[in-house]
Amino acid sequence: MSTQSLTLAPAPRSEAAEQVRAEVRDFLAAELAAGTFTTHVDTWLSGVDPAFSRKLGERGWLGMTWPREYGGAQRTAMERYAVTEELLAAGAPVAAHWIADRQSGPNLLRYGTEAQRREILPRIAAGECFFVIGMSEPDSGSDLASIRTRDVRDADGNWVVTGAKVWTSNAHLSHYAITLVRTAPADPAHRHAGMSQLLVDLSLPGITVNPIRILDGGHHFNEVVFDDVVVPGDMLLGEEGAGWHQVTAELAFERSGPERFLSTYPLLAAFARRVADTGDPAGVAALGRLSARLLALRQLSLRIAAALDRGELPDIPAALVKDVGTTFEADLIDEVRRVVDVPASLDSPDPLGRALAEAQLHAPGYTLRGGTNEILRGIVARGLGLR
């Protein structure tokens, strides 16, 4: 792939996006005032509130870019970006619907059958159907090509799935997993061949969901084990054997959004308020450095949203956003700790101390989920023809 893959046109200003942004801000201010939720770090993975997701669905803020016939609002990616950005900045509890809205729905629109679309997409747009990502596996790290979960046809034409997936966020609270499986034996000469994607109902017999707890005891990661799970034959997503191509397209949605650099935004906002109160020169300098990086990341992410509006698939720039974005999130924690003497505690009466504790405890996942930084840099290097 040529260097042209990293050249994206600037995102145009959208009056419609700014209008919906104002509407979302008013909604969030009212919800905060009513005590519906409290601001937290990393809520797109850990903040599960189905009732809140349904409120967003009622307002047309889920499935925003999808056709109306599938429950969508036929709005632009820039309008959706504005909604997403405001929800993340407020630390709102959006984890229940996040993956379904961000990537599972678009994947269904692109590769699903008409029956699959009509059955599932309106429920996602209403905030009533939640998805998980069934890609990573035990002992495989970020090497998706090494998956071992296998899928064979039985005499009735059903798929029988055996294997396991890990880091499946909120699988214990979700309805479906788009699951990458081997439908043909692995071929060392063609590592990306023989894979397919299935729409797996997580309530099927033979599925076990085992929690993987993070440092603060929270439970959103899971291991999902498939023990001869019988999946109906019509739940193949897309083409048999085209799983690698489909996953690559899906990852552009997963890696490019503002959640890749705004997971810790509530910490940055609390830090900015502290700096404004104290006027500390070291804090002002740190805030300037962080703000400059944040603005640059936002511009790149916005350009990707605009490219998606044009029907492009900017997978290489998306990998770059994920790499530099999650690095920024980790660096933010270090900058705050370096210039502010505040105890990090989940029980702290100081909002900055609470946000810092949450960010630190979630930090190990920032540069892992969605592909490790090393994997992402390899993708960018190949895109530039450097390897």
Image (tube, rainbow, N blue to C red):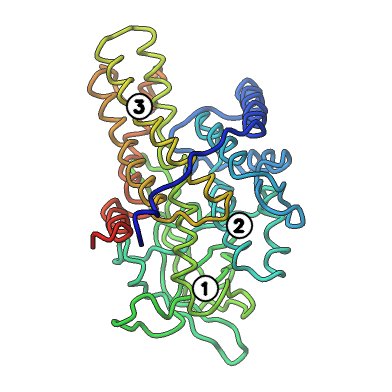
**Which of 23/36 is in front?**
23
Q: CA distance from mark 3 to mark 1?
A: 50 Å
Q: Quadrant of residue 17?
A: top right
Residue at disc 1, secondary structure: loop
Residue at disc 3, secondary structure: helix
Find disc 2 in the rendering and name its residue: 105
- Quadrant for the C terminus, please: bottom left
Q: Give how far across and how far down residue 81 sits, in percent.
A: 56, 39
* First reached walking from the N terminus: tag 2 or tag 3: 2
Q: Quadrant of residue 138?
A: bottom left
Find disc 1 in the rendering and name its residue: 206
The relative height of residue 215 versus residue 384 in the rendered view (above or below) is above
Residue 292's label in the rendered image is: 3
The kind of residue on which mark 2 rests is Gly
Q: Residues within 10 Å of mark 2 (few under 14, many from 20)?
A: many
The relative height of residue 31 versus residue 252 in the rendered view (above or below) is above
Q: CA distance from mark 1 to mark 2?
A: 25 Å
Residue at 68%, 61% (x, y): give it: 120
* First reached walking from the N terminus: tag 1 or tag 2: 2
Q: Give how far across and how far down residue 374 sits, in percent.
A: 26, 54
The answer to whether marks 2 and 3 mark residues whose Cβ atoms lie closer than 8 Å is no
The kind of residue on which mark 1 rests is Gly
* First reached walking from the N terminus: tag 3 or tag 1: 1
Instruction: State which mark lies toward you, 3 or 1.
Output: 3
**Which of 55/101 is in front?**
101
The answer to whether marks 3 and 1 mark residues whose Cβ atoms lie closer than 8 Å is no
Instruction: State which mark lies toward you, 2 or 3.
Output: 3
The kind of residue on which mark 3 rests is Ala
